[in-house]
Image (spheres, rainbow, N blue to C red):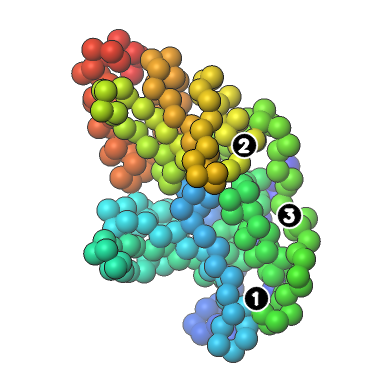
C-alpha cells in the first residue's frame, strides 16, 4: 500500500542553499497524474541524463537534464508547469546552428520531489539510465558530499526494484505502458517510407529483454534489428502491426510535443491511404 506522504531521500544541508527552504507540505505533488509521471520516466530513459560531476570545490553535483531541440520547448515548459518544479535553460546554439532547450532538475528537486515520486508510485528507470539513477540514489541516501569519497563499487539502492528478468514481466509493471509513450517521444518515429509503407520505429541501445517486451505489447513477430552492434531497432509496417500501434496510442494517449504532431500527421496519411484507410481509427 502506497504511503500518503512524500519523504525526502537522504538529508539536505539547507544552510548551504541560498533562498531555499524545506517543503513542509508535499501533498499537492501527490496529485500529479501517475500516467504523466510514467510517461516522464520513459522520456528520461530515452532523452534525459543524470549528471554526477565534481565541482571546483571537490563536492558532488547531481542534476537531471532533459535536452531537446528548440521545437519541443513548449513540451518542456508543459512538463515543468505540470510538475511545479525544475527550471528551463536556453536556448543554446549548437555548432551546426540548431538550438537546444533544457529542462533541469536540481539535486534538491530530485531528493525532495522527483525521485520520491518515482519511488512512491513504483516507477523506475530502465537499464539505459539505471546505473546513473542508482548512483544518485546512493549519494542521496548516504549523504555523500565529497567526490573523492565515492566508492569504486556502488551497491544497488534498496529503494530500486529489480529489473524484470524476462520480457513478460515488463508487462506486469503498472507504469510500463505509459513508459512506452514517453520512450516513444524520445526514441520513436512515425514515418512513411519511400514505397509509401507507413512505419512505426523504436530505437535504443542494446536491451534485448526490453525489446522483446515491446514486441509482446504490440503483438508483432517482427525481428528486432541490431545497428552498428550497439543499437536495437523495432520497425513495424504491416497492416496488423499498424493497427496495433493505433490501438495502443489511442488507449495510452499521453504523447506530447513534436512527437504528437508527427503522430497526428501520420494518422492523416493512414486515413487517406488506399492500403491503410480501412483500419479502425
Mark sitting on residue 208: 2
Q: Is residue 1 left or right of residue 68?
A: right
Which element type, helix, strand or loop, lies under badge 3? loop
Which element type, helix, strand or loop, lies under badge 2? helix
Residue 133 in which image quadrant: bottom right
Could you tell me if the residues under marks 2 and 1 are in contact, i.e. CB atoms within 8 Å? no
Label 1 and label 3: CA atoms lie apart by 18 Å
Q: Position of residue 144 (x, y in %)?
A: 71, 76
- Residue at 78 percent across and 61 percent down: it is 155
Q: How many marks?
A: 3
Mark sitting on residue 146: none
Q: Looking at the image, which residue sits at the far left?
A: 272
Q: Looking at the image, which residue sits at the far top?
A: 278
The residue carrying pointer 1 sits among few (fewer than 14), some (14 to 19) or many (20 or more) residues within 10 Å by Cα, namely some
| Closer to us: 68 or 233 | 233
The residue carrying pointer 2 sits among few (fewer than 14), some (14 to 19) or many (20 or more) residues within 10 Å by Cα, namely some
- Sequence order check: which comes first, mark 1 or mark 3? 1
Whether residue 180 appears in this view of the structure is: no
* Callout in the foreground (1, 3): 3
- Sequence order check: which comes first, mark 2 or mark 1? 1
Q: Is residue 172 left or right of residue 240?
A: right
Residue at the disc numbered 3: 159
**Image position of 162 with respect to 240: above or below:** below
Could you tell me if the residues under marks 2 and 3 are in contact, i.e. CB atoms within 8 Å? no
- Sequence order check: which comes first, mark 2 or mark 3? 3
Q: Position of residue 99 (x, y in %)?
A: 28, 63
Location of the N terminus by quadrant is top right
**Image position of 215 with respect to 110: above or below:** above
**Image position of 236 with respect to 72: above or below:** above
- Residue at 50 percent across and 52 percent down: it is 44
Residue at the disc numbered 1: 12
Amino acid at each position: 500500500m502506497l504511503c500518503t506522504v512524500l519523504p525526502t531521500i537522504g538529508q539536505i544541508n539547507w544552510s548551504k542553499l541560498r533562498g531555499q527552504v524545506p517543503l513542509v507540505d508535499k501533498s499537492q505533488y501527490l496529485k500529479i497524474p501517475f500516467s504523466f509521471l510514467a510517461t516522464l520516466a520513459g522520456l528520461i530513459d530515452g532523452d534525459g541524463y543524470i549528471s554526477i560531476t565534481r565541482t571546483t570545490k571537490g563536492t558532488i553535483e547531481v542534476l537531471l537534464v532533459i535536452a531537446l531541440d528548440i521545437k519541443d520547448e513548449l513540451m518542456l515548459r508543459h512538463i515543468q508547469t505540470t510538475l511545479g518544479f525544475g527550471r528551463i535553460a536556453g536556448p543554446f546554439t549548437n555548432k551546426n546552428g540548431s538550438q537546444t532547450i533544457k529542462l533541469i532538475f536540481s539535486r534538491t528537486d530530485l531528493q525532495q520531489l522527483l525521485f520520491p515520486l518515482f519511488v512512491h508510485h513504483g516507477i523506475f528507470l530502465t537499464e539505459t539510465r539505471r546505473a546513473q539513477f542508482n548512483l544518485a540514489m546512493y549519494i542521496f541516501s548516504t549523504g555523500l558530499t565529497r567526490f573523492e569519497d565515492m566508492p569504486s563499487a556502488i551497491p544497488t539502492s534498496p529503494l530500486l526494484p529489480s529489473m524484470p528478468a524476462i520480457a513478460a514481466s515488463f508487462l506486469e509493471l503498472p507504469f510500463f505502458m505509459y513508459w512506452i509513450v514517453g520512450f516513444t517521444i524520445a526514441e520513436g518515429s512515425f514515418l512513411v517510407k519511400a514505397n509509401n509503407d507507413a512505419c512505426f520505429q523504436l530505437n535504443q541501445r542494446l536491451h534485448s529483454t526490453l525489446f522483446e517486451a515491446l514486441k509482446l505489447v504490440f503483438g508483432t513477430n517482427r525481428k528486432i534489428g541490431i545497428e552498428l552492434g550497439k543499437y536495437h531497432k523495432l520497425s513495424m509496417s504491416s497492416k496488423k502491426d499498424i493497427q496495433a500501434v493505433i490501438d495502443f496510442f489511442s488507449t495510452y494517449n499521453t504523447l506530447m510535443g513534436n512527437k504528437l504532431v508527427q503522430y497526428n500527421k501520420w494518422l492523416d496519411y493512414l486515413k487517406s491511404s488506399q492500403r491503410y484507410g480501412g483500419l479502425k481509427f
